[in-house]
Amino acid sequence: MTGLVVDECIRIHRELGPGLLESVYETVLAGALSRHGLIVERQVPVDIAYDGMRFTAAFRIDILVEGQLILEIKSVESLKNLHAKQLLTYLRLTGRSVGMLLNFSGETMREGIRRVVNNHNRAQ
């Protein structure tokens, strides 16, 4: 599944180019993955619990593929460690293990792809 995501990202980047809004890349990538028969959800709201309180839709996942792979879409000059930490926190809080950070603003798409793995089990 991640290989297909990479292939589609590269194709989208080549055809549309860098510099568009994140929402454009999100929309097009979700459509491309759906066309391959994958279950794709956009802007998935995530509730979080903290200190005995529950917060509804505290953050949103850009794209969730097959209920397991989180895709975080960026359109920034360069990826920072902060972006990877954000995705890792999303993975930890949702109990998922793999995500991909995808930056469409680089000169090539390959330099804008990072796979992020959550090696910690969600504490309940």
Image: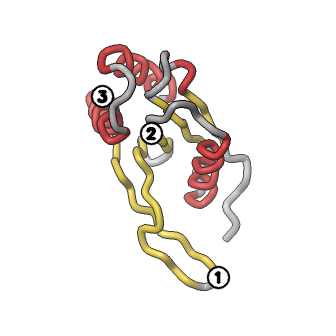
The kind of residue on which mark 1 rests is: Asp
Q: Residues within 10 Å of mark 1 (few under 14, many from 20)?
A: few
Query: Are the two marked residues, 2 and 1, in contact with CB atoms closer than 8 angstroms?
Result: no
- Residue 99 x %, y %: 56, 41
Q: Residues within 10 Å of mark 2 (few under 14, many from 20)?
A: many
Nearer to us: label 2 or label 1: 2
The kind of residue on which mark 2 rests is: Ile
- On the question of residue 24 being in view, the answer is yes
Nearer to us: label 2 or label 3: 2
The kind of residue on which mark 3 rests is: Ala
Q: Which residue is mark 2?
A: 73
Estimate the spatial distance between the alpha carbons at disc 2 and disc 1, rounded to whole Å: 30 Å
Estimate the spatial distance between the alpha carbons at disc 2 and disc 3, rounded to whole Å: 14 Å
Q: Which residue is mark 3?
A: 32
Q: Which residue is mark 1?
A: 51
Estimate the spatial distance between the alpha carbons at disc 3 and disc 1, rounded to whole Å: 40 Å
Dot 2 or dot 3, earlier in sequence:
3
- Residue 79 x %, y %: 58, 34
Helix or strand or loop: what does disc 3 sit on?
helix
Task: Say left or right for 102 vs 27.
Answer: right
Name the residue rendered at 49%, 23% in the picture. Answer: 106
Helix or strand or loop: what does disc 1 sit on?
loop
Name the residue rendered at 32%, 41% in the picture. Answer: 23
- Please name whichever residue, 51 or 3, is drawn nearer the observer in this view of the structure: 51
Query: Are the two marked residues, 2 and 3, in contact with CB atoms closer than 8 angstroms?
Result: no
Dot 2 or dot 1, earlier in sequence:
1
Dot 3 or dot 1, earlier in sequence:
3
Helix or strand or loop: what does disc 2 sit on?
strand
